[in-house]
Image (spheres, rainbow, N blue to C red):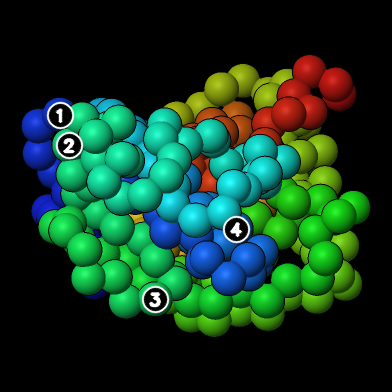
Amino acid sequence: MLRIVDELAGPGPLRICAHAPADGDPGTALRVLLIADVLARVVEQRGRAALIGWTGPEQQVAAAGIRPPDAEGDPESIAEALGGPPGVQLSSATYEGAGVAGLQIGAATLPPLDGLDLLAVRLLLLSRPYEEPVSVTAEQVDEAARAMARWRRAIADWATHPSKPIPADLKSTARTALDNRLDTAAVLRLVHDLATSDEVPPGAKFETMSHLDRVLGLELVREVGTV
């Protein structure tokens, strides 16, 4: 079990190495790089810098909200470019290289990516535990895109209400899920429940969704100001 706060705390930046499969499997490669991106977001939200290196074939994943790597190449050149050996390794296979922690990412079977909403693909991949294999259909991607569109419209409306603090229990639940298991699926369940809740004021819904999306990376606030 990955415990970000306990195992990855330390001085200096956290160096992350993501090993995209060398066999050209686009779905699994996307998922490995996605989880590296989310891990970096969580670590940075806790106040520590994160640097990411990628091995394997070159990937074009900006449309999925994945930031470019700080280094690419083989593990040795990545370690040199990042200023030291990675502290965590991510791979779809068991990785036996140096590193204080390792995440084995489950395979992902995706439809052809051309023409798909890759943020909707991101949503679907984050809705499952990262270690479990996942299979995604084009119909599921379309439904995920519609769900995000509904959330974005709702968030744009909530942004017009007076701001309210993030409910402490929601913030604590999300942090515990991410720190203990990088459990984005649990965070997405919070998003769904929050969107349909009648108990949380609109201003608090907006602040909570904005806060959670810093890790989820789904661009949920991009329609703010259009209502």
Query: How many marks do you count on the picture?
Result: 4
Q: In the image, what residue occupies the spot 75% across and 24% down?
A: 224
User: For mark 2, does the 10 Å Cα neighbourhood hold few (<14), some (14 to 19), or many (20 or more) residues?
Assistant: some
Q: Which residue is mark 2?
A: 84
- Looking at the rendered image, the disc whose residue lies closer to the viewer, 4 or 2, is 2
Dot label at residue 30 = 4
Q: Which residue is mark 3?
A: 93
Q: Between marks 4 and 3, how big is the CA–CA gap? A: 14 Å
- Looking at the rendered image, the disc whose residue lies closer to the viewer, 3 or 1, is 3
* Label whose residue precedes the other's in the sequence (1 or 2): 1
Q: In the image, what residue occupies the spot 17% across and 56% down?
A: 99
* Amino acid marked by disc 2: Gly
* Label whose residue precedes the other's in the sequence (4 or 3): 4
Q: Which residue is mark 1?
A: 12
User: For mark 3, does the 10 Å Cα neighbourhood hold few (<14), some (14 to 19), or many (20 or more) residues?
Assistant: some
**Coordinates of residue 79 in the picture (x, y in percent):** 25, 40
